[in-house]
Structure formats: C-alpha cells, structure tokens
Amino acid sequence: DVTCRYVHGVGAVEGGAVLVSFIDVTPVEQASQMRRDFVANVSHELRTPLTAIMGFIETLRGPARDDAAARARFLEIMEQEASRMNRLVGDLLSLNRVETDERVRPRDQVDLTAQIASTLNSLRPLAEEAGVELISDGPGHPVNVTGDTDQIRQVLTNLIENAIKYGSSGGEVRVSLTEVERDPAVRGPAVRLLVMDKGAGIDPIHLPRLTERFYRVDSHRSRQKGGTGLGLAIVKHIINRHRGRLRVESALGAGTTFTVILPR
Ligand code: ADP
C-alpha cells in the first residue's frame, strides 16, 4: 500500500527517454487520513449527546411542559449527557497536553507507592458501587521514578478505573508494584506495575488496536459505563513520554492484566 505522488517529468533526456520522478508520500497521506478520522470521530462523539440534549429541550418546551415527573427525568438525562461531553472534552485536552509534552523529559520524583495508595483511595467509592474489591501489594516502602506526577496519576486512574468498569461484580481488582534489577523492555532497572481484573476479558484480536483513539471492544458497554474511548490512548502516550512500555494480556472469561514498565 504505497501512495505515490507524481512530482515532475523532465522533457526529453538523452536517447529520447523521459525522466519521471515520484515521491513516496505514504506517511504524509496516512497522517492526514488519521487527522481526518480523528476530527470525524470527535464530531460524532460530541454530536450524539448534543442531539439528545436538543431533543429533550424540545420535549420540555412542548409535550412534557406540565409533567413534573417527566421533567425531572429528562433533566437528569440531560445532565448525564452534558457530563459525558464534559468528560470527552477533558480527555481531549489531556491527550493534547500529553502529545505536546511528549518531547520534554519529565523531572518530578514520583513515589509510586504513595500514588497508588492515594489513587485507590479516590477510586474506592466507584469500586464499592460496582461491587469490586480493591487489593494492592507492593514493597511497602517508597518507590521513586523520575516522571510527571500528574501524568503518572492519570495512568493509574485510567487503568484502575477500567479494571473496575470492565471487571466483574463481586470480583477483585489487584494492583501490584515490584522493583526489578533489570527489565529487557527498558534495558535497565525498572518498576513493574500490574493492574489485574477478573472481568470478561478481551478477545485477542482486539489487543493490537486497544490503545488507538476511540477504539472500543464493545461500544455499547463503554458508553454505558461513561467511557470516552480515549483512556488507553492517553495512557500509551504518557508511558511513551516516560520511555516505558505498556503490555496487555487477556483471556476471555478470565480477566485482563495491564503491565506498565517504567525505567527506575
Ligand atoms: P473507554 O473510555 O471506552 O473505557 P479506553 O481507551 O479506556 O476507553 O479503553 C478502550 C477499550 O478497551 C474499552 O472500550 C474496552 O472495550 C476495552 N478495555 C479497556 N480496559 C479493559 C479491561 N480491563 N477489561 C476489558 N476491556 C477493557
């Protein structure tokens, strides 16, 4: 699949031949196609809740004007749709920020033990609501990496939130941190962070595309759970910026494990 653009033809050269030059513009075409797809996806994702809100406004002005119960129900749905738009805009801004920062080396000293504990604390209400138990194991002492505190926090939040969202009710989500002398993925001392759930798992055919923007295995489930389809794309960019690696292993019916390897 090579896209060639004709560059120029030079009149007759010696011997009556014509010299024609082509340039391979495949990467340029691919980048601009990706940009077009992205804009189309964002427009679609914003338009869906917007259309719902506009529909409900019409109904509230007309048929449901004097129906207090219907009004309360519609206002609640409009609020949910508005917060979906808000989450999407928030994730788009995060993605933009992460892409802009990608060439700048992060410099904070980030204690992963403390960050995991505090992320789990903030996500405990969500886990309780979903009937999921949060378990964590690690060395119990500070484990420092050089990184961007807010972005590392976002990686933890996105992965643990997904494990809760897509894990099974009554199951558990385990977050585990280990220090290793050497990990081949980063060619040196590293930390490994595992986020494991015992949910429905992901069919292996989806795994290579999982970190693409707006890629969802089950769109209905993702939307129902309030997903924007950008969480793992953000995670991937942040890990790239930290010169780390992201791995995912999953088995249908058994659960999913995301592994983040960061240089220490
Ligand atoms: P979303 O906002 O839809 O959750 P993400 O980028 O975070 O978007 O994840 C992309 C897709 O990957 C999700 O829609 C879901 O289908 C799948 N996924 C992510 N994490 C898990 C998990 N722990 N278990 C099963 N599926 C998952």
Image (cartoon, grey):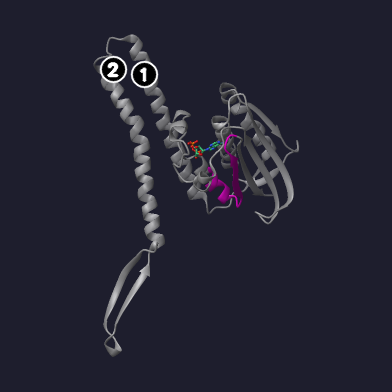
**Circle 1 sits on which residue?**
75
The x and y percentages for residue 40 are: 34, 44
Q: Is residue 107 left or right of residue 85?
A: right
Query: How far is the residue under mark 2 from the one under mark 1?
Result: 9 Å
The x and y percentages for residue 101 are: 51, 49
For ligand 1, tell me if the residue under mark 1 lies within 8 Å: no
Element class at badge 2: helix
Please determine whether, in this image, residue 130 is positioned above or below residue 249.
Answer: above
Find out whether residue 236 is within the magenta segment.
yes
Magenta segment: 235-253
- Residue 250, quarter of picture: top right
Please determine whether, in this image, residue 8 is positioned above or below residue 196.
Answer: below
**Circle 2 sits on which residue?**
60
Q: For the image shown, how many numbered marks are present on the structure? A: 2
The x and y percentages for residue 251 are: 59, 39
- The residue type indicated by label 1 comes to Leu
> In the rendered structure, are the residues bearing label 2 and label 1 in contact, judged by CB atoms less than 8 Å apart?
yes
